[in-house]
Image (cartoon, rainbow, N blue to C red):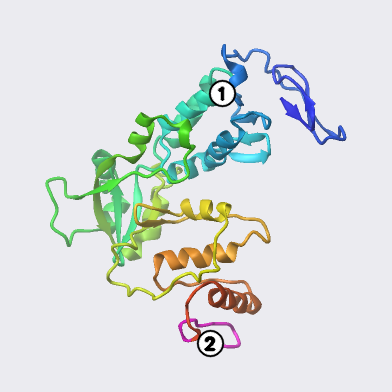
Amino acid sequence: MKYGGKMKNIQNEEYYMGDDDGEGEKMNTDFSKLELKPDHVNRPLWACADGRIFLETYSPLYKQAYDFLIAIAEPVCRHEYNLTPHSLYAAVSVGLETETIISVLNKLSKTKLPNDMIDFIIASTANYGKVKLVLKKNRYFIESPFPEVLKKLGNDGLISKARLYSDPYGGDGFTIGKTSGELEAGPGELLNAAELAAATQEKETHSFEIDPAQVEIVKHRCLPSELNYPMLEEYDFTNDNVNPDLDMELKPHAQPRPYQEKSLSKMFGNGRARSGIIVLPCGAGKSLVGVSAAARIKKSCLCLATNAVSVDQWAFQFKLWSTLRDDQICRFTSDSKE
C-alpha cells in the first residue's frame, strides 16, 4: 500500500502511516495471515477483521471504491476507513442492503472478507432499515415491508398505547401500500444488474398510525438498547396536500456543485425526504444545500441558528439563491420578531 509516498505491503507486520516527510505513526499490526485472492492486484481494498478498510489511492478503481466506502464507512484519512454501527446505519438509510454491502466489499477486497467483518455487518444492519417513521399529511405512520416485524412492534406495550385505530385495516390490522427501493448514492457499475434490481424493486409495505404526541416515546422504544429496530425517518412531501405548497424555485445562477448534489441525493428518494445530518466543511456551501433542499420540498421550513447574525445570513441566502420574496421570509430573534 502507499502511505505518504512510500510503498509498503499491508501484510508486513510493521508499516508506517504518515506524510511524505516520513513523520507518521508506526503500526504494529500483523496482517500476514490475510489470504490474498489470485487476482488481488486488480482489487483496491484491504479488509481487516477489526473493521478497518485500507484503499489504494493509486488504483484505477479508486474513485468507484471511494464512492462506495464513504457510503458505508467513516473516513479516517484518504486511504483508511472504519466500519461502525453508525456508518452502516447511514448506508442502510440510503437504500444499501446487508447482502449488497457484503457483496460489493468482497468484489473490491484483495483478500477474502474476514468472518468477523461479515458478522459485524450483519449484526449492525440486521434490523436497520426494516422500520420507518413516515410523516404523511401531518400524520405519523410506522411502516415496514416486513409484516412480522410490524406485528412485533404493534404488540409491544408502549407502542400499542401510542397506536391509533381510526382507519379501516385489513386482516393484520395494517394498511398496505407499495414503495419502490432506490439506490441514490450507490457504487455505480460495481453493482451488477441483479443487485441493482434488488435495490430498486417495488415492495409491499405495511403500516399503522401512531399518536403524534407519542412519537418520541415510540422512537426511543425502537432504539438498539430497547427493541433494536431503529427507525429511519421520512417525510412524504410529494403526496402532502394538507400543507400548502410554497412557490419557490432556485434562481438560474444557483448551480449546486457535484459534492453538494451528492449530499442532497442522500436526503431524497422515492418522493420523500429523509431525516439526517449533512456534514460539509467551512466554505463548502452548506447554505446553498439547505436552500436547495427547501426548494425541492416546496413547503414552509424553519431554519434554526445560534445567533441573530446567522438568522440574517440565512435570510440573505434564501433571497440570493431562491425566488422567495422578502414578504415570504420571516426572522425571529430575541430583539425582533417579524
Identify the residue at image location x=50%, y=85%: 326
- Label 2, residues with CA under 10 Å away: few <14, some 14-19, many ≥20: few
From what the image shows, is residue 273 above or below residue 90? Answer: below
Locate residue 255: give its quadrant.
bottom right
x and y, in percent, of residue 181 in the image: 34, 44
Q: Secondary structure at mark 2?
A: loop
Q: Residue 109, labelled with which disc?
A: 1
Identify the residue at image location x=38%, y=75%: 246
x and y, in percent, of residue 7 in the image: 77, 23
| Residue 238 visible, this orientation | yes
From what the image shows, is residue 90 above or below residue 278? Answer: above
Asked if the residues shown at circle 1 and circle 2 are in contact, with their CB atoms under 8 angstroms apart, the answer is no
| Residue 156 visible, this orientation | no
Locate residue 204: give its quadrant.
top left
Assign the N terminus to one quadrant of the image. top right
From what the image shows, is residue 336 above or below residue 56? Answer: below
Between 83 and 19, the one lying in front of the other is 19
Q: Residue 299, labelled with which disc?
A: none
x and y, in percent, of residue 186 in the image: 47, 40
Q: Secondary structure at mark 1?
A: loop
Observer-side mark, 1 or 2, equals 1
Q: Amino acid at mark 2?
A: Lys
| Residue that label 2 marks | 337
Q: Is residue 210 left or right of residue 311?
A: left
**From which residue to which does the magenta span run?**
327-338
x and y, in percent, of residue 302 in the image: 48, 72
